[in-house]
């Protein structure tokens, strides 16, 4: 099974993707994480995208499609959760082609619906573990011991450079202009499943499970 988690920045895509990995043995493919890795490694591509990411703009379709293509080749059996990809209609078309070429299908697109005020709260309180990538929030999901990752014990907890009000404004505009048309695109294909992303993390996870287990043929 291959699914997309679709939603604006801060909707909870990464949080739910990590749960699905644990609970269903699926693989999270986050283009945001891949791009941040490229930046940290100092590769030519990483240097090129750094300024664009910090400003909250989208990097070129060519770069992210290339990243996804590499991952699909590494694991031809599928079982992917696409998180933060596709973000444009061109990326959506490319994903359809890539999956078809690998004999894979897209099974569901989960749209996490969250309003803008809540996105601001979520983004301003977000921090992640620099070692294992676990996602936390100052108010709604703090680490059990302050300054220490629940999952791996690391004290390397980080906030993202683009999680500031100015970049968030740009990221939201990019989402509404370029990514939200994907809602209609996947609705027309009969693949869209909206979920209330405002509910607590466990409730959202249960709703996603209902969708995935309740689809015809699953
Ligand atoms: P969030 O979790 O807040 O939705 P991501 O970690 O997915 O953000 O993405 C961070 C940044 O990486 C984006 O603002 C954009 O610059 C870049 N990026 C990630 N995925 C894509 C994509 N599919 N297309 C273009 N740019 C992307
Ligand atoms: P995205 O990957 O869509 O950008 P994240 O999964 O990183 O979103 O979540 C953004 C922030 O909101 C994180 O700090 C996370 O802990 C928190 N969060 C995620 N889901 C919920 C939820 N259902 N209720 C409250 N806070 C949440
Ligand atoms: Zn950790």
Image (cartoon, grey):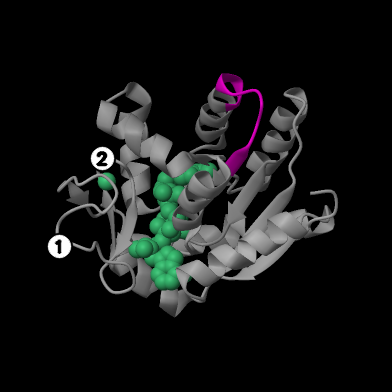
In the shown orientation, is residue 193 left or right of residue 207? right
Ligand 2 shown in quarter: bottom left
Task: Confirm or reject: label 1 Cβ below 8 Å from ligand 3.
Answer: no
Q: What number is the disc on residue 146? A: 1
The 10 Å Cα crowd at callout 2, few under 14, some 14 to 19, many 20 or more, is some
The answer to whether one can see residue 159 in this image is yes
Of residues 34 and 74, the one drawn nearer to the viewer in this rendering:
74
Across and down, in percent, residue 139 comes to: 28, 74
Q: Nearer the viewer, residue 162 or 130?
A: 130
Label whose residue precedes the other's in the sequence (1 or 2): 2
Secondary structure of the residue carrying tag 1 is: loop
Spatial distance from mark 1 to mark 2, Cα to Cα? 16 Å
* Mark 2 sits near ligand 3, with its Cβ under 8 Å away: yes
Which residue occupies 36% across, 46% down? 53
Residue 144: image location, x then y, percent: 22, 63
Residue labelled with disc 2: 131
Residue 132 x %, y %: 31, 41
Residue numbers of the magenta segment: 72-81
Q: Quadrant of residue 197 in the image?
A: bottom right
77 magenta-colored: yes
């Amino acid at each position: 099974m291959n699914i997309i988690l679709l939603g604006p920045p801060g909707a909870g895509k990464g949080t739910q993707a990590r749960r699905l990995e644990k609970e269903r043995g699926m693989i999270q493919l986050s283009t945001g994480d891949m791009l941040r890795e490229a930046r940290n490694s100092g590769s030519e591509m990483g240097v090129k995208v750094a300024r664009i990411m910090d400003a909250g703009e989208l990097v070129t379709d060519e770069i992210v499609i290339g990243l996804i293509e590499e991952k699909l080749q590494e694991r031809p059996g599928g079982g992917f959760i696409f998180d933060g990809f596709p973000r444009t209609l061109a990326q959506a078309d490319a994903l359809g082609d890539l999956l078809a070429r690998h004999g894979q299908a897209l099974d569901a697109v989960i749209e996490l619906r969250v309003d803008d005020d809540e996105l601001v709260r979520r983004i301003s309180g977000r921090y992640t573990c620099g070692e294992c990538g676990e996602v936390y929030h100052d108010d709604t999901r703090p680490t059990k011991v302050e300054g220490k990752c629940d999952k791996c014990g690391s004290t390397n907890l980080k906030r993202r450079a683009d999680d500031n009000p100015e970049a968030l404004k740009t990221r939201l505009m990019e989402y509404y202009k370029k990514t939200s048309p994907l809602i209609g695109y996947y609705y027309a294909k009969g693949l869209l499943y909206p979920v209330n992303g405002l509910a607590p993390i466990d409730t959202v996870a249960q709703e996603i499970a209902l969708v995935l287990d309740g689809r015809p043929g699953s």
